Image: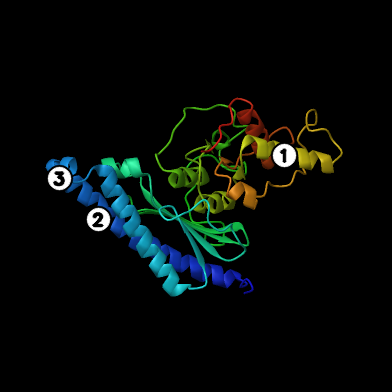
Amino acid sequence: MSTPELSIADLQQILSFTTTLARKAGALILEGSQAIQSAPAKDINEKKNSVDLVTEYDVKVEKMVKKEIAETYPGFKFIGEESYDPAGPPLTDEPTFCVDPIDGTTNFIHGFPYVCISLGLIYKKRPVLGVIYNPFLDHLTTVDGKGGSFIRLAGDPSGGGKSEEKVERGRMAHSLRSMGSAALNFAMVAQGGLDLYWPWDVCAGIVITQEAGAIITGSSPSFASALSSFYSSQDQPSSSAKLSNDIAPFEVTPEILTGRKYLVVRAIQGEDGETGLVAQSRIVQEFYGCVDDVAVE
């Protein structure tokens, strides 16, 4: 069977469906949170622990989402966190929904309101659409085909606005922060609330942060390989060459998408004649020069 061609209009229709689905799933997530918080301590200790309850609602949300997608888009494939099999069939060009039904499970257990559902669409092995919804705060982050629907919280990467609002070089870190949810951390990078994030796995967040001007790359070796390929094409040695302003944006290849290691850096303004992309790439180089790569089990 040939891969269906999806137009911009098709993607906008799918986005509308996915947004409605995210809100429906959000209601079920809130129901699960209420069940956990209101369960008598005796029941939690003797019948179920909190992890059991989280798993129960993880599965409930995923089943509901999978059913809705199958009814509306029966030809689309589905990857869900609760049902995913690493030994299963490889990623194809077919439209594939990638879903994390409850992202931020520890927050979910404790009633900390930074929990979301993450729904992404992969098409021709590339992430093309993303919806992240936090039902506790009724906070929706999407890509709508017109640059995304999010509010930029800090810094103007284009260099506009007041001088004190510009993000220059981006080398100082106020602190290290995490919201306890990979998808919500990605959304915060898109908005500027976080400058850089080093997660393990995500799909919808890639689409949203790319629309916001962020750069996404894979593990340290994959980033080094991308740089090496670029410099080889320019007949420049990667070990000594400086990043040039015509460096191509790093593409999220199938290898990176399925590699479960990502680094995302928010949009920033370059200085001294460098583009924002070169500044972002330089930050990635500096970051990976300070951390060790760890194998994913």
Indicate the amino acid at tag 2.
Glu
Residue at (62%, 63%) from the top-left corner?
93
Circle 1 residue? 225
Label pair 1/3, CB-CB below 8 angstroms = no
> Residue 31, position in %: x, y?
25, 55
- Nearer to us in this view, 291 or 115: 291
Q: Does residue 121 show up?
A: yes
Query: To which quarter of the image does residue 50 belong?
Result: top left
> Residue 297, position in %: x, y?
51, 38
Circle 3 residue? 43
Q: Does residue 136 show up?
A: no
Helix, strand or loop at mark 1: helix
> Residue 24, position in %: x, y?
34, 63
Q: Alpha carbon of mark 2 to alpha carbon of mark 3: how far?
A: 17 Å
Circle 2 residue? 31
Residue at (59%, 69%) from the top-left corner?
8
Mark 1: few/some/many CA within 10 Å (<14, 14-19, 20+): few
Residue at (35%, 44%) from the top-left corner?
105
User: Quick one: label 1 or label 3, which is nearer the N terminus?
Assistant: 3
* Tag in front: 2 or 1: 1
- Nearer to us in this view, 290 or 158: 290
Indicate the amino acid at tag 3.
Asp
